[in-house]
Amino acid sequence: MKIIVFSWRDPKHSLAGGAEQVMHEHMKGWVAAGHEVTFFSSKVKDLPQRETLNGIEIIRGGYQYLGVQIAGFFYWLQNRQNFDLIVDQFHGIPFFTPLYIRKPKLAVLQEVAREVWLKNPLPWPLNWVIGLIGYFGEIIVFQLYRKTPFMVGSDSAKEDLIKMGIVGGNITIISHGVIITKPRKIPQKEKKSTIVFLGALTKDKGIEDALRAFALLAKKGDYQFWVVGVAEDINYESRIMNYAKRLGIKDKTVFWGGRDKVSDKKKFELLARAHVMVNPSIREGWGLVNIEANAVGTPVVAYKSPGLVDSVQDGKTGIICKENSPESLAKEISDLLSDKTKLERMKAGARKWAESFSWNKSKKLSLDLINSVVK
């Protein structure tokens, strides 16, 4: 089978995250099964227009926010006879393939964006204009996909799709696997209580709430805070660092990575050394970073948000906050770190939970799905 996947970012993009890793792993499974996979994504500075990665042909064209959809449309017009299955990956804006493609299609979605639209990084007032268009327009967009089968990674994503008018029988949940680059020897936890934030430095991922929670904790005890992530906008990155300074925690906070990504090896080392990971994201498709932290024995304190409630087992692998606020976040972290027995129990539960996720199993399920879509 010849498959084309349309997506806004490829795995080598500087801002590639869990969604890109998940799609790449599924495609690797399809290639291993003998299928030919072409991946059309946005152009990236210093990366070639075409290259092959793990047997997947990557083609880059167009700007990531909207230009890639237009470039993808023209690529399809020139190559429409070459493919048997089209995979349309949602990330806010999909590729609108039901409007111009009549061949078998599969939509892949991590999360329904909803309020994430209102947290976009564009300057005011453009951020509100685009945010409101996206928020209300998303409902209309999903109507184009009512007859298209969907692949999602969590119950939360399925529930949100159903609210958008997609029939439940058209939605298949395939849990994600997890890729762990464990240190050869798992390092000891830091002597000082250490809380880590891992994720893109964006408003929707909750970095500002994380810093406010850090500031509240700093008033109560001796903590250190680590921020592991990259900002899409260098100006926003500067504002975040200045915000930490205004909150009085700049000297207690280490920003790892800067404009360059922390390596996977270093990421898992930091996760292992931290006592707790904090995840105040307002919405996720799953929350892969939670499983990554769990894999090295680090519980997660997270907001009660779609996706996070799926990947964090409340009371077993971490804590789900009773309300989504920095105050609740700080309280739950403080209570957990002060209860050594509970903390040790959660560390063990976290490792066990992470071990239950397998990419071999997930790839087999997605193979079965694409075969059924084409048939």
Image (cartoon, grey):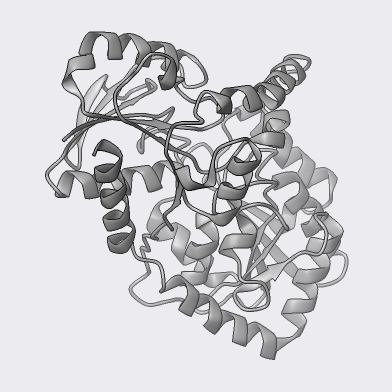
- x 77%, y 64%: residue: 321
Q: Is residue 45 left or right of residue 110?
A: left
Mark yes or no: residue 330 visible: yes
- x 37%, y 69%: residue: 183
Residue sitting farthest toward the bottom:
341
- Viewer-proximal residue, 104 or 24? 104
Tell me where residue 110 appears, x and y as whole percent: 51, 43
Give above or below for 82 relative to 268.
above
Mark yes or no: residue 228 visible: no
Q: Is residue 138 left or right of residue 294?
A: right
- x 81%, y 52%: residue: 212
- x 52%, y 20%: residue: 65
- Viewer-proximal residue, 140 or 181? 140
Tell me where residue 343 appears, x and y as whole percent: 65, 83
- Viewer-proximal residue, 307 or 194? 307
Q: Quadrant of residue 337?
A: bottom right
Q: Is residue 136 left or right of residue 145?
A: right
Residue sitting farthest toward the left:
34
Give above or below for 226 relative to 294.
above
Query: Which quadrant is the C terminus positioned in?
Result: top left
Q: Quadrant of residue 326?
A: bottom right
